[in-house]
Image (cartoon, rainbow, N blue to C red):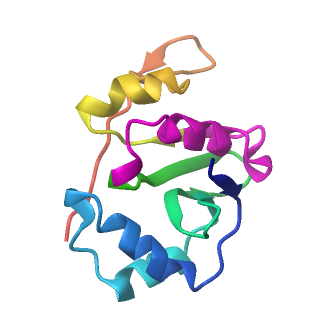
Amino acid sequence: MPTVERSLGPKAADELCSLYGTYEWWADRDKRAVRQAFAATDEVVAFREDDGDLVAAARILTDYTYYAMVFDVIVHAERRGEGLGEELMAAVVTHPPLSGLDLSLLAREGLIPFYEACGFEPQGGIDHPDGEPEKLRFLAYRR
């Protein structure tokens, strides 16, 4: 059974890059870019095997006041289907520095049922004080 690790040192960026290599969409991420992203990450929740191997991880960016955004949720390809993803997300939502914050994430359509099972809900809008919901849409400025 993997153990939860709530803080990863700088050397873990290389391990994280190797873990990303087990996922086709992220297999081309290079170590320099992963190190840079990792250095700018506010919180990390990860699972390690007894032998020390990193088998699952999630990065979180947050202002520690209102919002926290979850990124790069990954479970090693050889460990998928064992429930580690659900356990990882449970560790993320109970991570003490995130207590009381709304968590959000972007998910591929096929993963929405997984995240719903973890307690996340699709958001079609937010309620304003006047009671009228306002639809929010994801926007991106691509380079």
Tell me the quarter of the picture where residue 45 sits.
bottom right
In the image, residue 100 lies in the stretch drawn in magenta: yes
Residue 3, percent from left and from top: 68, 54
The vertical placement of 108 against 8, above or below, is: above
Residue pictured at 53% horizontal, 34% vertical: 86
- In the image, taking residue 37 as reference, residue 33 lies left or right, namely left
Q: Which residue is pictured at 45% across the width and 37% down the height?
A: 82
Farthest residue to the front: give it: 51
In the image: residue 35, left or right of residue 33:
right
- The quadrant of the picture occupied by the C terminus is bottom left
**Residue 116 position (above or below residue 44):** above
Q: Quadrant of residue 114?
A: top left
Q: Residue at x 49, y 34 (%)?
A: 83
Answer above or below: position of 135 versus 95: above
> Against 95, is 113 above or below?
above
Query: Camera-side residue: 26 or 77?
Result: 77
Asked whether 67 falls inside the magenta stretch, the response is no
Which x, y percent locates residue 129?
63, 19
Q: What is the tally of numbered marks visible in this picture?
A: 0
Residue 121 appearing in the image: no
Residue 100 position within the rendered picture, expressed as x and y whole percent measured from the top left? 77, 37
State which region is magenta. Answer: 78-103
